[in-house]
Image (cartoon, grey):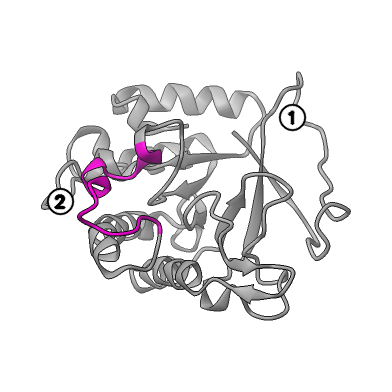
């Protein structure tokens, strides 16, 4: 579910109830940097659909866990993949990297989102059980066969993880690969520390539900050695 695509908080509970009625136990949500930070000098987590407090409260009331996916890049079939459009002018350097200008651009949004989520984590009696870093970002190797890490990408993910932790996120961190051929960031995958301090607790794999039910199993161990278990994200 994308709350920013249904910017009327009064309608959220109806959607959550329908998801619960389908037999689901968790819902994942993208949050949109460009929606919350429409200009470089302001971030809105307070007005209307920008305030997700009620969403998290509704999810708990309905009985659904929540996976929060704040990006900064979320794809979501959005312009610039959900990056704030003002960050794409070239003034902020290389996007989705550890550059100082890009880091300064996303920091207020990521900081605000983590602080918003903090009191709604499972550890605080809330519904949020996982928190995603970036999205479909398999850039941690310059050459995976030669085991040559990509320091820009690793540093970028480290900065995102550090920001989340510093602002109160304690539930498991996750990342999702776009498919089974993606290189995971999970702690139990690489043996030469390409992920550095950016390794996540759980690696997800995007899989689109094309069947009449979501009961199918997806074993990726034979596709990617080292993937000891797989969680599915039905997008």
User: Splitting the image into 4 quarters, where does residue 142 fall?
Assistant: bottom right
* SS assignment at label 1: loop
Res. 214 mark: 1
Q: Indicate the position of residue 158 as horizontal and vertical percent values.
A: 45, 72
The answer to which of 135 and 124 lies nearer the viewer is 135
User: Splitting the image into 4 quarters, where does residue 183 fall?
Assistant: bottom right
| Mark 2 crowd level (few <14, some 14–19, many ≥20, 10 Å Cα) | some
Does 137 sit left or right of 53 as displayed? right
Q: Examine the rendered structure and indicate whether residue 6 appears above or below residue 192.
A: above
Point 18% across, 45% down: residue: 44
* Residue bounds of the magenta highlight: 80-96
Q: Indicate the position of residue 185 as horizontal and vertical percent values.
A: 62, 64
Does 14 sit left or right of 209 as displayed? left
Quarter of the picture holding the C terminus: top right
Point 64% across, 24% down: residue: 22
Q: Residue furthest top?
A: 212
Q: Indicate the position of residue 146 as horizontal and vertical percent values.
A: 72, 74
Inspect this view and state whether residue 51 appears. Answer: no
Q: Which residue corresponds to mark 2?
A: 40
Q: Residue furthest left?
A: 41
């Amino acid at each position: 579910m994308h709350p920013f695509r249904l910017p009327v908080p009064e309608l959220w509970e109806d959607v959550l109830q329908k998801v619960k009625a389908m037999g689901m136990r968790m819902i994942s949500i993208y949050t949109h940097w460009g929606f919350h930070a429409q200009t470089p000098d302001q971030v809105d987590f307070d007005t209307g659909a920008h305030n997700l407090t009620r969403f998290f409260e509704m999810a708990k009331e309905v009985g659904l866990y929540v996976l929060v996916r704040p990006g900064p890049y979320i794809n979501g079939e959005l312009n610039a993949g959900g990056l704030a459009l003002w960050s794409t002018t070239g003034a902020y350097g290389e996007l989705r990297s550890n550059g100082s200008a890009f880091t300064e651009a996303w920091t207020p949004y990521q900081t605000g989102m983590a602080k918003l989520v903090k009191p709604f984590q499972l550890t605080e009696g809330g519904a949020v059980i996982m928190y995603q870093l970036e999205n479909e970002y398999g850039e941690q190797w310059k050459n995976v066969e030669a085991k040559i890490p990509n320091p820009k990408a690793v540093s970028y993910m480290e900065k995102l993880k550090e920001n989340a932790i510093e602002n109160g996120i304690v539930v498991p961190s996750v990342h999702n690969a776009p498919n089974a051929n993606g290189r995971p960031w999970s702690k139990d995958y690489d043996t030469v520390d390409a992920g550095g301090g950016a390794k996540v607790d759980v690696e997800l794999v995007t899989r689109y539900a094309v069947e009449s039910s979501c009961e199918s199993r997806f074993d990726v161990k034979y596709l990617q050695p080292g993937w000891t278990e797989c969680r599915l994200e039905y997008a």
